[in-house]
Amino acid sequence: MLKGLGLILSLALIGYLFDSSDLGNAVNETWIDAHIRGHGVEGTLLFLVVGMSFTALGLPRQIIAFLAGYAFGLLPGTLVGTLATLCGCLLTFLYARLFGRSLLRDRLGARAARFDRFIHEHPFSMTLLIRLLPVGSNVLTNLAAGISSARLAPFLAASFIGFLPQSLVFALVGSGISVAPTLRIGLAAALFLISGMLGAWLYHRHRHGLGIDDKVDAALGEAEQP
């Protein structure tokens, strides 16, 4: 939770620098303003490709949502940022499933086996629980899913829904909607806390005694007592 709030505040600072410094103007003109804003479908597709590539390689999806909010506004940015993250999720999943199973099983074998047990019976609902959590690694989850027996369709559908809350929060931070900056950042922080607590509560209620990772369980107070 504290890391997420820190990320919100740092991105708000970046947004302020975008608007008030020469560095911000250069970044805006050379990429967002020059290639995304006002470029219609081509600009949107370019953003999706870039966002997909970076999230597939491990860039935090919250940063993509922030940039999408800046480029497209709140609601369109939420949707575009979520789609970019989902495409990155798909790319990592397919890489692990088609090309990386033999290599990744040695490195993620225990994690993948635990993930497999976690989502085996209820792939949609259990994947949704994972995506709503404020902790854990997005790219490691995608890799573990790729080398597990998880079915692609429910995994992607649940991931899309689970990505939406934080995408909305960080698109709100990045967007230029006509709300006082302090109020906008405060609202984003409150929404982040609410979504994180909801995810933790749902995980506690519906995990059926299973866990996806010792560190995640410990962070949520779900580690088994010796």
Image: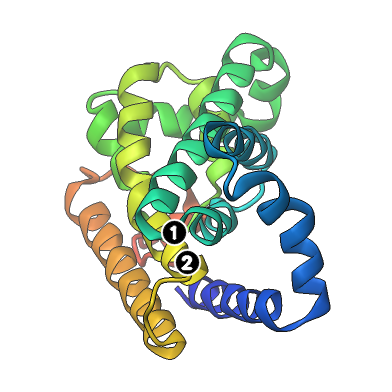
The quarter in which the N terminus is drawn is: bottom left
Q: Which residue is nearer to you in this view: 99 or 23?
A: 23
Q: Residue furthest top?
A: 98
Q: Position of residue 22 (x, y in %)?
A: 82, 77
Among the 4 quarters of the image, the one containing residue 49: top right
Check disc 1 and report the residue beneath it: 73
- Comparing 19 with 187, the one in front is 19
- Where does residue 134 sit, x and y in percent of width and height? 42, 61
- Quadrant in the picture for the C terminus: bottom left
Q: Is residue 171 left or right of residue 157?
A: right
Asked which quadrant contains residue 114, the reply is top left
Relative to residue 47, is residue 136 depicted above or below?
below
Task: Judge whether residue 90 can be spotted in this image.
Answer: yes
Give the camera-side residue of 88 and 112: 88
Q: Earlier in the sequence, mark 1 or mark 2?
A: 1
Badge 1 marks a residue whose secondary structure is loop
Is mark 1 in CB contact (under 8 Å) with mark 2?
Answer: yes
Secondary structure category for the residue under label 2: loop
Residue type, numbered disc 1: Gly
Q: Foreground: 34 or 92?
A: 34
Q: Which residue appears at 52% of the width and 30% of the height?
A: 87
Residue, x 29% and y 27% (percent of image)?
123
Report which residue position mark 2 lands on.
Answer: 175
